[in-house]
Structures are given as structure tokens and as C-alpha cells.
Image: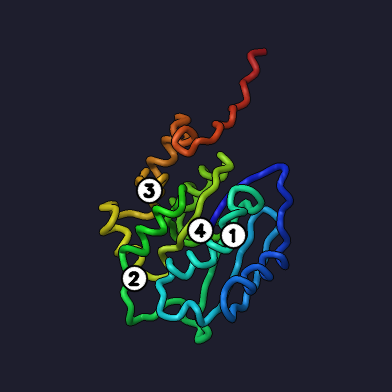
């Protein structure tokens, strides 16, 4: 999923996002839902055949690259081929695809589930910390295919999920992210403003 914020830019409609996906990806069929803050796109196209899930998602990300951080606050993506398979089982997800996802997204979170429906408490807490800072971020669901987690852990040398990367560098898992959030260090790393905590009354 990709997150961004803007008070002045107009929020696109679900129909607009659907039309852009279907115009940009060959023979694509898209269903987009959302409430103006979080969007979810389910995209089916024969163009995804033989590609890893990460590579498929990257194709959809590129459609909205100019708007991420400006008009779209969050975008969760699910991809399928015409046969309903999101990945060719005979093709091992290359580590290069994960590297490309990390390098091409300034802030990317590998998690269990999606921001709207996290599948573990650690992933939910990490997403919450990022959203409290109104940070822009991309997410990839490692439960979508077990090979994603295997390749990721081999690449990062970090065994647990979630894993947060900023500017290509591994920040850590849930405990580290929460600790950094509480000290204000996470906001500094992300380049966003740390929300001010309300002062307690002394009366």
C-alpha cells in the first residue's frame, strides 16, 4: 500500500483511478474502492503473467507515481492474471525484484496483511505509527506468497515481519519502529513533523 497526504490537492475518485489503470495497463480490468483517504485496487491483466507479485504491483504503482504524496493518501493493491493467479508458481520471485521495490519506494513496509486489514498485531502497530505521522509509505503483504518473506529475510538478514525500509535502508521491525516513534527519531528519519503531544494541565 502507498500513503501520502495533501490538504490542497484534489482527492481523485475511485472511478478516476479505475480509468487510469485500465488505460495504462494492457487489457486490464480494475475494481477500485475507497473513502477518499484509503483506496484499494484489484487489477486483473494478462500483462502480469509470469511476473512476481512485487513486479506486478510495481506496474500499478507506476501508473500513479506522479500523484503519490500529492493526491492519493493510501493505495492498497491486489493483482491477478486472467487465470486468477497472481504469480507463476514455476517462477521463483527474484531477489532483484524486492531490491527494486525497496530502492524505488522511499518508505516501504513489508507486513502481514494490508494497512486496512493487518494480519498481526505487530504489523498493525507499525502501520499505526506511520499513519500517526501522516507519512507516505508503500506496503507489500508477505502473506500473499511465502517466497516473498523468504527472499526478503535472506536479503535483509532480518528474520521477523514487519520490516520497514527508508531510503533503501532497513530501519527494523515493530519494536524498533515504535521506540523511534515515541522518541521522535522516526519522524526525523521520515522527514516529517513530529505531532505535538497535548500538555497536561497543571491546575
What residue is disc 2 on? 93
The crowding category of the residue bearing disc 3, from other C-alpha atoms within 10 Å (few below 14, some 14 to 19, many at least 20), is: some
Mark 2 or 4, which is nearer the eye?
A: 2
Of labels 2 and 1, earlier in sequence is 1
User: Do tag 3 and tag 4 residues touch (Cβ < 8 Å)?
Assistant: no
What residue is disc 3 on? 168
State whether residue 39 is above or below residue 196. Answer: below
User: Residue 120 is drawn in which quadrant?
Assistant: bottom left
Give residue 8's position: percent from left, percent from top.
Answer: 72, 43
Q: Secondary structure at mark 1?
A: loop
Q: Residue at x 46, y 60 (%)?
A: 140
The crowding category of the residue bearing disc 1, from other C-alpha atoms within 10 Å (few below 14, some 14 to 19, many at least 20), is: some
Q: Secondary structure at mark 4?
A: loop
Give residue 137's position: percent from left, percent from top.
Answer: 51, 50
Of labels 2 and 4, earlier in sequence is 2
In the picture, the disc for residue 64 is 1
In the picture, the disc for residue 118 is 4
Give residue 102's position: percent from left, percent from top.
Answer: 40, 54
Position of the C terminus by quadrant: top right
Q: Residue at x 56, y 61 (%)?
A: 76
The crowding category of the residue bearing disc 2, from other C-alpha atoms within 10 Å (few below 14, some 14 to 19, many at least 20), is: many
Q: Residue at x 42, y 45 (%)?
A: 166
Of labels 2 and 3, earlier in sequence is 2
Amino acid at each position: 500500500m502507498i500513503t501520502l497526504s495533501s490538504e490542497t490537492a484534489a482527492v481523485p475518485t475511485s472511478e478516476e483511478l479505475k480509468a487510469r489503470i485500465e488505460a495504462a495497463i494492457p487489457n486490464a480490468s480494475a475494481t477500485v474502492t475507497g473513502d477518499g483517504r484509503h483506496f484499494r485496487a484489484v487489477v486483473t491483466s494478462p500483462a502480469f503473467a509470469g511476473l512476481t507479485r512485487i513486479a506486478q504491483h510495481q506496474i500499478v504503482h507506476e501508473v500513479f507515481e506522479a500523484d503519490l504524496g500529492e493526491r492519493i493518501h493510501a493505495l492498497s493493491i491486489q493483482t491477478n492474471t486472467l487465470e486468477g493467479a497472481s504469480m507463476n508458481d514455476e517462477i521463483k520471485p527474484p531477489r532483484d525484484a524486492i531490491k527494486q521495490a525497496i530502492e524505488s519506494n522511499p518508505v516501504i513496509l513489508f507486513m502481514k496483511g494490508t494497512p486496512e486489514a493487518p494480519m498481526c498485531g505487530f504489523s498493525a502497530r507499525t502501520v499505526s505509527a506511520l499513519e500517526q505521522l501522516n507519512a507516505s509509505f508503500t506496503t507489500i503483504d508477505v502473506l500473499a506468497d511465502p517466497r516473498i518473506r523468504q527472499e526478503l529475510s535472506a536479503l535483509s538478514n532480518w528474520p521477523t515481519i514487519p520490516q520497514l525500509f527508508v531510503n533503501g535502508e532497513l530501519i527494523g521491525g515493530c519494536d524498533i519502529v515504535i521506540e523511534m516513534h515515541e522518541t521522535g527519531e522516526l519522524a526525523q528519519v521520515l522527514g516529517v513533523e513530529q505531532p505535538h503531544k497535548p500538555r497536561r494541565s497543571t491546575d
